[in-house]
Image (cartoon, rainbow, N blue to C red):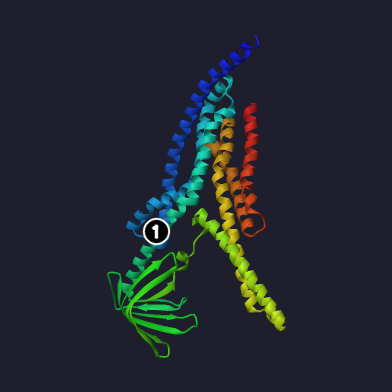
Amino acid sequence: MCACGPVRSGSGGSSRDGPMKLLQRYILGELVRVFLLLVAILTVMLVFLGLFQEATERGLRLAQILQILPFVVPSMLPFTIPATLLLTVCIVYGRISGDLEVVAAKAAGISATQLLWPAFLLGGVLTASSFSLTSYVIPWAVSNIEQIVTQAMEDIFLDALAHDRHFSDPVRGFSITVHEVQNRVLKDATFQYRTRSHEQISMRAAEASMRFDLDAKVIRILLKNARGTRSGGDTLAELDRTELTFPLPQELARVKSRHMTLEALMRGVEEQQLAQRRKQSEAAQEAAMLLMMGDFQQLSGDQLTVLQTEQRRARNQELRFRTEIHSRFSMAASCLFFVFIGGPFAMLQARRQFITTFVMCFLPILLIYYPVMFLMVNLSKNASVNPLWAMWVPNLILGCVGISVLSRVVRH
């Protein structure tokens, strides 16, 4: 009799496994189908908004907009995936609960947790996908976008120079005057600029070509048959194939941490730590030298202040990179936590419309999750908290709420 008990139990378990796996496959198929449809619609909407903003801010033409279109799509996905996944689970689980399929599954011995496994699986896959997008795909896409935009800015600049035949930048202290522009070559060009020692230099070239170097963050101008003079009229030299460099516009020169690869961020952390140690050592040596010389007034002088400022700047950069690294892990994992709270909540709200369920679920996330996330980011960048744990606080809040909602679903 004891031997028969396990056989009957195993037979009953096998009889439940078939319907359970069939139902899980059905739910997973519905989740994937609805998610792909929604993410495509939402991404297309955001892509067109993003392209319109980019074209307006940078004056891009239609051909350039079409060039950057394939690279804008992956840049939008990390922002659309979590909310779209939440809407997906609200639709699918709200529908099957409204059709009493959850009640029927429980009557057949299939728990609510087992019904949620397809959503957890999809959430896990999208978590890994989101992390890959933010760490590798987006930096690659942004790099390509910047190259296209840089080329566009070159074209716009050369068109303006061909029309006006003069360009000046008083802030950076240089100006360009040309006779004409032919095939991206400046003819009979005169360049006037200030050196770091505030000396005014004038260079006149028969021909000149220019390009924007994103890697070095400079504008490179190659001069042919050039002649240079100082402000006093002294001739520098007769030069040929001389290269001038000027800083790029601020919007092109600045590299945002969210556009860097994970390896670049980690390398940046190490470089900033090294810079801090170097500046700290230089400041200590300078202070020791001033003490030995008895020049106590210079302990609060400009040289030490500059070194301390550079050390603080390196520290701020390190904190910015560290915060970005940990935020990528936590933001990617938000897909899993959105599912953890959205699936059980949709089951509880079975009789409501799915859009009502989504709003009831997403509104607290907007009012609590994202503000807490932004707060933790700012506190981490200011060294008030450690980003290693601080960036997970919003997900922890969602996890606690999800456990509470799931326990109600399991009980009832």
Image quarter hosting the C terminus:
top right
Residue 280 x %, y %: 64, 69
> Against 61, is 47 above or below?
above
> Against 342, is 25 above or below?
above
Say what amino acid the circle numbered 1 marks: Ala
Classify mark 1: residues with Cα within 10 Å, few (<14), some (14-19) or many (20+): some
Is 392 left, or right, of 178 in this rendering? right
Residue 373 x %, y %: 60, 50
Count of labels shown? Answer: 1
Q: Nearer the viewer, residue 74 or 60?
A: 74
Residue 32 x %, y %: 46, 35
Q: Nearer the viewer, residue 171 or 262?
A: 262
> Against 241, is 11 above or below?
above
User: Which residue is outermost to the top?
Assistant: 1
Residue 285 x %, y %: 66, 75
**Can residue 225 be seen in the rendering of this structure?**
yes
**Can residue 79 be seen in the rendering of this structure?**
no
Q: Nearer the viewer, residue 88 or 198?
A: 198
- Report the residue marked by disc 1: 55
Q: Residue at x 59, y 44 (%)?
A: 365
Is 93 left, or right, of 48 in this rendering? right
Q: Residue at x 51, y 25 (%)?
A: 21
Where is residue 9, by image quadrant?
top right
Where is residue 8, by image quadrant?
top right
> Against 236, is 395 above or below?
above
Q: Residue at x 54, y 42 (%)?
A: 335
Q: Secondary structure at mark 1?
A: helix
Image quarter hosting the N terminus:
top right
Q: Residue at x 38, y 65 (%)?
A: 153
Where is residue 273, by image quadrant?
bottom right
